[in-house]
Amino acid sequence: TQELQQQLFGGDPQRRIILHDHAGKHVLDTCAWFLGHGMKNTRALRGGIDAWSLEVDPKLPRYRLEVD
């Protein structure tokens, strides 16, 4: 875990980390993992990248996930 933190974030536990997925439904587990491993400035993007494209950057193309 410390090796992963070092590779991804330079070992800085205060570094801001913002995680996202498509709709913000599954990212919370990953966020909890980072928080539980000392990365206390980890946040999840509410609504995911889809909400970002609607509310913040409408030039960002939206997409629909196809699930079989």
Image: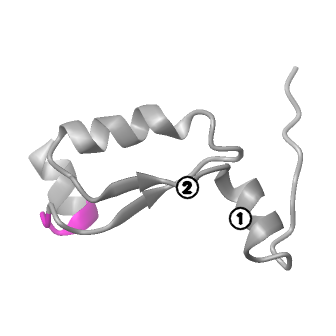
Q: Is residue 19 left or right of residue 14?
A: right
Quadrant of the frame with the N terminus: top left
Quadrant of the frame with the C terminus: top right
Say if the magenta span includes residue 13: no
Label 2 CA crowd tier, 10 Å (few <14, some 14–19, many 20+): some
Tell me what residue is drawn at x 41 percent, y 38 percent: 30
Predominant secondary structure, magenta span: loop
Q: Position of residue 22 (x, y in %)?
A: 70, 47
Q: Amino acid at mark 2?
A: Leu
Reading the chain from its start, which is encountered first: label 1 or label 2? 2
Location of residue 34 by image quarter: top left
Extent of the magenta region: 8-12
Vertical side of 8 occupied by 23: above or below: above
Q: Which residue is denoted by mark 1 in the rendering? A: 52
Say if the magenta span includes residue 10: yes
Tell me what residue is drawn at x 17 percent, y 41 percent: 37
Tell me what residue is drawn at x 12 percent, y 63 percent: 11
Vertical side of 61 occupied by 44: above or below: above
Pointers 1 and 2 in contact (CB under 8 A)?
Answer: yes
- Total marks in image: 2
Badge 1 marks a residue whose secondary structure is helix
Q: Amino acid at mark 1?
A: Trp
Badge 2 marks a residue whose secondary structure is loop
Vertical side of 67 occupied by 11: above or below: below
In the rendered image, the residue lying farthest to the top is: 68
Label 1 CA crowd tier, 10 Å (few <14, some 14–19, many 20+): some
Q: Is residue 66 left or right of residue 29?
A: right
Q: Which residue is denoted by mark 2 in the rendering? A: 45
Give the CA separation, mark 1 to mark 2: 8 Å
Q: Position of residue 36 (x, y in %)?
A: 21, 36
